[in-house]
């Protein structure tokens, strides 16, 4: 067993457990888009970042790929993590505002606007479909093509794959093309009406004694900064 | 080649090879690296071989063809041993002479390398500034070794280190030695190599395969040191890999090299084959039981494959994209086995460390950053090439001392280190010692060692955009923040360079850049925002200029600049437009285009410093710029000014405006205010208007008839000229306001000569240049006599010298300047004309004492200078040479070191005071020209110090606009809109004659005793003018050319012609 701390809480897990698995087991929420149980961790969406290490050596890593280490100190919602996560959500919103999954995540993280040129892309290249097809359906009909801004998911030369059994697994796991947000004007669809999970202590000072699972708590960090 | 089967055999073989060298024969060394071959060294090699064969010189002359030697600027070049004489840019016809000289042991001074045109030649390669400051421990071998001959390498001590470690057969010792040497990865991240080897050695279960990989996937734009090494000395890489293999317990090595390096692949392939044939590579090497073999894997050219996890996947035959670490490659790398990846340069350091010992090596460079580093110095720098210096050398030393500074007149602005994901470091930080930590602190990275020098013609926002464009297509696209982040960063930068930027863009840019750096998977993404962050940090004002002022000072961002010639002109003259009209023969149209913006076309046609030509795209693309000033002169001399009638305001305004000083600035302001309907009074201290134009610019450059005509045309019924009225004596600012003037424009100029601060400066026969020129131009007084010395290097120094030469009783005229001719601020054509007239030029001298007798000048004592370090202006500072003093007897001494405004009268009376800067100029708001006192504006030399005519005119124009706004109670400062070309002028069909050279105007050379007033430079002929105008690249067409479907949004040239005909 490996012992480590997560948000100040001492914990232990078996060797090979990822931070994400450990955190979720212990009840610390970490958002993900490209992670799914049963598929190889991929580390593409970067939403599951957590902060490890201390002082100058502190850095952000993707919790879905990082195995717990002896003595590791993990913060799942530090100021640095939240700031980065919000920016990632803003980027996601700017490119795929029609996804309800993304809209919900943005609302849950209090992202209220996006400041980039609005795009409507149906794919965030999370790779869930590719892994689903290969690892669970054992077909390998689709894969990635191109690099950089030209990267896309598809079949070689866009020819229909003989290996595809039309199982629909790829569509089932897709976080973008499933569950479209139904708001009337997609670019303004950052309503937050579907979910709002921001901790109450952020807005109200008198929740000083609330049991907080975050160490350091975002709200406390903000408050400290203001003082 | 017989296979060597034991260590003893190898050692005796090496002894044999080393004894065989024929050092006494002269030898021609020719670089045939990629750079050399591109510059034509293959032709030179062919000719040399033909000479050797035809003349039977096989026994008398040797030829060595090497890989890249570093000084790529000089290719193709020949080095002749034993003297190591370097002949740069060898032409095929000179080869015979070089061979003859080599055979006779002589040197050809005319072909030898010179630092600069006016410098003496350098006999030995090592004396050349570029090489002198380097420490070429690794790169130096390239000159001695023919990369396809293993014997050459062995002769130079190659494989000694391998033999040494094989004999010891102690991997722990090797790792310890490398650790003690302090060697760190040269690929960029600077991870300690010894530590990596230790981890790799410890990894695995001790039975299975391990790999050592040489990373030669060098993809940074502008970096080629790894190519240089692999091409020029492949055996050193092999030897390094074998030692690494022995150290970590790997029996297999892979060189991962980009397919774009065919020569490197070829040389490495040959080297591997030769090493195998000789028994240095393969099974049971030299009977020591050590197995090691190598193969080459060619990369398909993805930038990201330089990242180690992506590189491994690429070797495995998968898509080259990184994997999240951990596990690190040393634990689980290629095929899941422990893999150690080192950069080419790191591996080349290994044999050196084993041979020299870790202690010796660790003393090179800085503690913690030991050894040397190779940089590829490219960009706007004189000496481009590969540079090897000890760690801790400052950027300044590399750029200015080794690189020789800026390539042209524009000063160096920044250096970008570390390739596309490095940061830009500004000149102010050039004292930064180069090591991994300092660079990281400065917001850049060591990277593989690219070093791109940028000058003032580089726009930093555009540079950031360029790299972001590169990175957004080279990002593998796997992780979201890298792929989308670089795209969005590019988008934001594109908005800014296109004039669509807002200040919110800047905040978002910074925020996003920081998040991208923080959250991406591999090194590519983590360093990708560096160009943005570092330019935001050091060149913030350029971003602000792009956003707020809609201005790109470097003249690069085309949506803000339009045509660079127009953007460069302080008064915004549409140079492209009149040049286009001249090409079509429409001279009146051309005149109108000039006169629209410039009330002094004939004056500027003669004395303008033509900033337009500096920024001309033709000039920046390697050719000479279009001779815009000479073309303006052609038009101004051939067209009747009355073709242009300025638009006047119909209603007269009642507010009176006073202008102090009737120089170009004052007259321009008066003219434009008069056109707006204001009654203007111009006060002038001298008896005639014209200011410096009249009193300081000599008649041979600017005939008075032309000047007077141009001034008279500006004095209309709204303008009252009051000559002989001195500010501070006859009137004050207060008295003007009391008399009912509502606004005052001060354009007094800078007329007080600066002093040398030496005793005897006031003796008879010594004059400040302004005083000397004024006396002659205003009153015809000839103050110079006998031997004349002029101290200074600017235009007024040259003017004074040439004026003195034209005076009676003057014998010899000499200009004394403290730096070299290249650094003289005077116009090059003026210096040339002065020399042609017989004026002597003495450079690198500083006056130290003025000798007088009976109150008269008898001479000056000078001290000679040598050029020292670069100063902040990027020019090398002159340093005195002790004991080099010499006496120069002179009868007249003219001091032309600089001028400054006389601002005493502004500060004397506190009730009437105007704020003054520490440089004795008036303090104004640069955007509005408003002084500290409301209603008072100032411009021209009195604000800027000595400056050009066109800048004074620009100040006058601006003042007129500002005064108008002030009087009408409007907000002074307004948002600037970029002025883009709007009028379409159909380009002429050009003939088949091909490119022509820049025209030179005909000149009358003054000879002593001739007519001193005759204008030296003459007008171009019509034929020359039209041909010159045709050279223009017509940058305007990018904005004005009608679309194919006949868009009518632009005015057409035909329409203008019709309008003109009416």
Image (cartoon, helix red, strand yellow):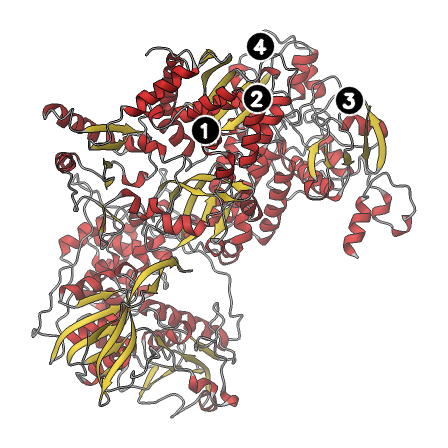
Separation of marks 3 and 4 at Cα, in angstroms:
39 Å
List the residue tagged with mark 1.
B351
Residue A15: mark in rendering: 3
Give the CA distance from mark 1 to mark 4. 53 Å
Q: Secondary structure at mark 3?
A: loop
- Element under disc 1: helix
Q: Is residue A50 above or below residue B904?
A: above
Q: Quadrant of residue B603?
A: bottom left
Earlier in the chain: of badge 2 and badge 1, it is 2
Q: The C terminus of chain A lies in which quarter of the figure?
A: bottom right
Q: Nearer the viewer, residue B62 or A196?
A: B62
Q: Is residue B835 left or right of residue B984?
A: left
Asked if residue B200 can be seen in this view, the reply is: yes
In the current view of this chain or complex, which residue is farthest to the right?
A: A209
- Chain under label 2? B
Residue B998 bears which disc, if any?
Answer: none
Circle 2 SS class: helix
């Amino acid at each position: 067993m490996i012992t480590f701390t997560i948000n100040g809480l001492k914990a232990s897990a078996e060797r090979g457990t990822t931070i994400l698995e450990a955190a979720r087991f212990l009840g610390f929420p970490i958002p993900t888009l490209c992670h799914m149980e049963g598929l190889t961790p991929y580390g593409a969406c970067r939403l599951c970042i957590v902060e490890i290490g201390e002082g100058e050596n502190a850095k952000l890593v993707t919790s879905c790929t990082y195995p717990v280490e002896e003595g590791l100190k993990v913060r799942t919602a530090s100021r640095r993590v939240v700031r980065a996560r919000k920016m990632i959500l803003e980027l996601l919103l700017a490119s795929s505002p029609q996804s309800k999954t993304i809209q919900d995540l943005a609302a849950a993280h209090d992202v209220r606007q996006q400041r980039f040129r609005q795009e409507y892309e149906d794919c965030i290249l999370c790779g869930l479909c590719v892994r689903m097809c290969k690892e669970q359906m054992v077909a390998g009909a689709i894969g990635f093509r191109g690099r950089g801004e030209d990267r896309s998911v598809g079949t070689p030369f866009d020819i229909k794959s003989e290996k595809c059994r039309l199982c629909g697994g790829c569509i089932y796991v897709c976080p973008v093309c499933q569950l479209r947000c139904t708001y009337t004007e997609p670019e303004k669809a950052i309503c937050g009406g579907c979910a709002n999970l921001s901790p109450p202590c952020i807005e109200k000072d008198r929740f000083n004694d609330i049991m907080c699972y975050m160490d350091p708590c975002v709200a406390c960090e903000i408050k400290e900064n203001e003082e | 080649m017989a296979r060597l089967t034991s260590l003893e055999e190898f050692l005796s073989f090496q002894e044999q090879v080393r004894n065989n060298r024929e050092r006494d024969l002269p030898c021609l060394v020719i670089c045939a690296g990629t750079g050399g071959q591109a510059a034509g060294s293959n032709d030179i090699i062919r000719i040399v071989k033909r000479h050797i064969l035809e003349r039977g010189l096989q026994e008398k002359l040797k030829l060595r063809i090497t890989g890249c030697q570093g000084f790529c600027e000089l290719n193709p070049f020949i080095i002749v041993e034993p003297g190591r004489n370097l002949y740069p840019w060898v032409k095929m016809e000179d080869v015979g002479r070089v061979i003859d000289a080599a055979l006779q042991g002589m040197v050809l001074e005319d072909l030898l390398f010179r630092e600069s045109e006016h410098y003496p030649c350098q006999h030995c390669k090592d004396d050349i500034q570029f090489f002198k400051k380097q420490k070429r421990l690794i790169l130096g071998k390239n000159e001695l070794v023919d990369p396809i001959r293993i014997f050459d390498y062995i002769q130079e001590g190659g494989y000694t280190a391998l033999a040494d470690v094989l004999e010891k057969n102690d991997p722990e010792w090797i790792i310890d030695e490398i650790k003690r040497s302090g060697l760190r990865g040269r690929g960029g991240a600077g991870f300690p190599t010894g530590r990596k080897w230790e981890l790799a050695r410890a990894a695995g279960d001790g039975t299975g395969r391990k790999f050592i990989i040489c990373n030669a996937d060098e993809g940074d734009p502008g970096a080629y040191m790894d190519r240089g090494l692999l091409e020029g000395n492949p055996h050193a890489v092999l030897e390094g890999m074998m030692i690494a293999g022995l150290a970590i317990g790997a029996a297999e090595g892979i060189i991962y090299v980009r397919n774009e390096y065919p020569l490197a692949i070829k040389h490495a392939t040959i080297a591997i084959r030769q090493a195998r044939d000789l028994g240095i590579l393969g099974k049971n090497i030299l009977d020591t039981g050590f197995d090691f073999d190598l193969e080459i894997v060619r990369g398909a050219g993805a930038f990201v494959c330089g990242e180690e996890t992506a590189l491994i996947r690429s070797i495995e035959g998968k898509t080259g994209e990184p994997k999240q670490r951990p596990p690190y490659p040393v634990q689980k790398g290629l095929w899941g086995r422990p893999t150690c990846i080192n950069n080419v340069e790191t591996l080349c350091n290994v044999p050196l460390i084993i041979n020299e010992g870790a202690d010796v090596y660790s003393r090179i460079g800085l503690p913690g950053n030991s050894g040397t580093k190779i940089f590829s110095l490219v960009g706007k720098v004189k000496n481009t090439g590969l540079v090897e210096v000890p760690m801790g050398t400052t950027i300044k030393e590399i750029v200015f001392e080794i690189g020789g500074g800026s390539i042209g007149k524009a000063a160096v602005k920044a250096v970008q280190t570390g390739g596309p994901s490095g940061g830009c470091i500004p000149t102010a930080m050039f004292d930064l010692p180069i090591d991994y930590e300092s660079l990281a602190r400065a917001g850049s990275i060591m990277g593989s060692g690219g070093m791109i020098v940028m000058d003032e013609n580089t726009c930093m926002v555009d540079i950031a955009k360029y790299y972001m464009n590169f990175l957004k297509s080279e990002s593998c696209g796997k992780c979201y923040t890298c792929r989308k982040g670089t795209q969005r960063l590019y988008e934001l930068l594109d908005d800014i360079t296109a004039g669509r930027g807002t200040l919110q863009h800047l905040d978002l840019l910074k925020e996003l850049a920081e998040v991208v750096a923080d959250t991406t998977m591999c090194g590519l993404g983590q360093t990708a925002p560096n160009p943005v962050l570092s330019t935001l940090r050091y060149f913030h004002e350029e971003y602000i200029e792009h956003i707020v002022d809609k201005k790109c000072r470097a003249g690069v961002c085309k949506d803000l600049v339009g045509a660079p010639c127009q953007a460069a002109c302080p008064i915004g003259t549409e140079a492209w437009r009149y040049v286009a009209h001249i090409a079509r023969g429409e001279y009146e149209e051309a005149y109108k285009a000039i006169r629209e913006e410039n009330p002094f076309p004939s004056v500027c046609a003669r004395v303008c410093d033509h900033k337009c030509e500096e920024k001309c795209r033709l000039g920046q693309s390697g050719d000479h710029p279009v001779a815009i000033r000479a073309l303006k002169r052609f038009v101004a001399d051939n067209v009747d000014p009355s073709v242009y009638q300025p638009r006047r305001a119909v209603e007269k305004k009642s507010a009176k405006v006073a202008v102090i000083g009737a120089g170009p600035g004052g007259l321009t302001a008066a003219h434009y205010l008069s056109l707006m309907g204001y009654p203007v009074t111009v006060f002038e201290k001298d008896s005639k208007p014209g200011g410096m134009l009249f009193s300081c610019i000599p008649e041979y450059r600017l005939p008075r008839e032309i000047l007077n005509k141009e001034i008279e045309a500006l004095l209309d019924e709204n303008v009252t000229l009051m000559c002989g009225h001195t500010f501070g004596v006859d009137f004050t600012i207060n008295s003007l306001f009391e008399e009912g003037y509502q606004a005052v424009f001060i354009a007094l100029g800078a007329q007080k000569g600066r002093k040398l601060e030496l005793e005897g400066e006031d003796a008879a026969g010594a004059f400040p240049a302004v005083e000397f020129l004024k006396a002659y131009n205003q009153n015809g007084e000839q103050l110079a006599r006998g031997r004349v010395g002029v101290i200074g290097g600017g235009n007024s120094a040259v003017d004074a010298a040439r004026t003195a030469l034209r005076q009676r009783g003057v014998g010899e005229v000499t200009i004394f300047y403290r730096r070299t001719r290249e650094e003289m601020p005077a116009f090059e054509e003026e210096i040339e004309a002065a020399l042609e007239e017989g004026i002597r030029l003495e450079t690198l001298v500083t006056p130290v004492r003025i000798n007088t007798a009976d109150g008269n000048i008898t001479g000056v004592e000078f001290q000679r200078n040598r050029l020292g370090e670069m100063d902040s202006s990027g020019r090398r500072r002159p340093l005195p040479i002790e004991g080099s003093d010499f006496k120069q007897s002179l009868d007249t001494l003219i001091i032309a070191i600089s001028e400054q405004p006389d601002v005493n009268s502004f500060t004397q009376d506190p009730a009437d005071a105007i704020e003054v800067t520490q440089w004795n100029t008036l303090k104004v708001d640069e955007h509005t020209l408003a002084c500290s006192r409301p209603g008072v504006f100032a411009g021209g030399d009195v604000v800027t110090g000595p400056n050009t005519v066109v800048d004074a005119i620009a100040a006058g124009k601006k003042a007129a606009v500002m005064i108008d706004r002030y009087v009408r109670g409007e907000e002074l400062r307004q948002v600037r809109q970029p002025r883009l070309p709007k009028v379409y002028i159909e380009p002429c069909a050009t003939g088949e004659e091909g490119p022509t050279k820049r025209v030179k105007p005909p000149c009358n050379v003054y000879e002593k005793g001739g007519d001193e007033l005759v204008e030296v430079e003459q007008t171009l002929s019509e034929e020359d003018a039209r041909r010159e105008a045709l050279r223009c690249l017509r940058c305007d067409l990018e904005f004005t050319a009608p679309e194919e479907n006949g868009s009518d949004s632009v005015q057409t040239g035909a329409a203008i012609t019709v309008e003109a005909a009416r």
